[in-house]
Amino acid sequence: MLQSIVDLCRELTGLARDLLQVFRRRTTGTEARPARARVFGGVVFLVIPLLLVAAAGFAYGLGKQPAEIFGEQGQGVDVAGFCRSYGFPGNTLNSCSSQVDLNAACNWQHGRSDLRVHFDPQAGSYPGRAAWSALCFDPAGNSVDRDGISDMRGFCAKEFPSSSQVRAVVLDDQGEESESGGSWVCQSKIDMDLACAWQYQNRDIDAREEDGRWSCYQ
């Protein structure tokens, strides 16, 4: 790229000299024409530096192409690596995710370590509602609550304290949020600008989406 700029500069300089020589030959023989030649020469050598500055700016712009490292999702932003850095083992295109350990959630909510989750056998009468029917039982088989795990959002916040936007949702088999059944997941939306800054260790990088694909630009 640098060599191309140098070559361009040489060509522009040579062209300016040729134009100046032609103009001087045409203006020879009068008293006024030498003055015009000096003016023309000044204009030529004023324009040339401007052209060189423009060429350098264009080359600099070319050097600012997206800095891309293709992640597991085939994007310029390494969303999988970013999510792992926050402790999330999985991700979708726009969110970090981790399936909830319901036994751990039961024990966290009740301040115990011996509880296990069982689903309400009557949940089968309500298609897709099994995810909301989890109840916490002690080793003797007694239910310790009537409403199941009531603070799933709080459990997710405890599991991922560095993610302020984490929430608890139910996702279906396609990874889409659903009210008709699925599994509890702790999920946090990805800040793509922050992901780019993490990926390249540079705060002066921002993310842009083009044709459904995220890339990092500086």
Image: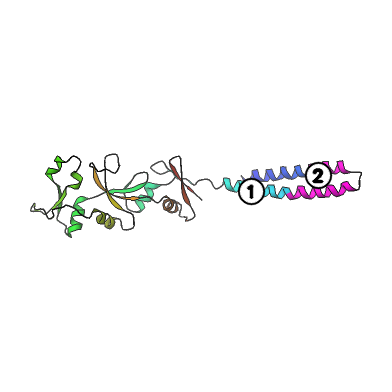
State the image coordinates of residue 190 (x, y, percent, origin top left).
38, 50
The chief SS type of the magenta part is helix
In the picture of the structure, the residue carrying the numbered disc 1 is 56
Query: Where is residue 207 drawn, in percent x and y?
Result: 46, 49
Q: Is residue 25 magenta?
A: yes
In this figure, which residue is indicated by the disc labeled 2?
20
Mark 2 crowdedness (10 Å alpha carbons): few <14, some 14-19, many ≥20: some
**The stretch drawn in magenta includes residue 49:** no
Between marks 1 and 2, how big is the CA–CA gap?
24 Å
Disc 1 crowd rating (10 Å Cα; few below 14, some 14-19, many 20+) is some
Instruction: Name the kind of residue labelled 1 in the image.
Output: Ala
What residue is drawn where x is 31% and y is 48%? 97
Counting from the top left corner in percent of width and height, residue 10 is at: 71, 44
Count numbered badges in the picture. 2
Of label 1 and label 2, which has the lower sequence position? 2
Element carrying mark 2: helix
Q: Which residue: 87% across, 46% down?
A: 33
Magenta stretch, residue numbers: 18-46
**SS category of the residue bearing label 1:** helix
The amino acid sitting under disc 2 is Leu
Relative placement, left or right, of 175 versus 35 is left
State if disc 2 and disc 1 touch (CB < 8 Å): no
Q: How is the image coloured?
A: rainbow
Q: Give how far across and how far down residue 15 sits, in percent.
A: 75, 42
The N terminus, quarter of image: top right
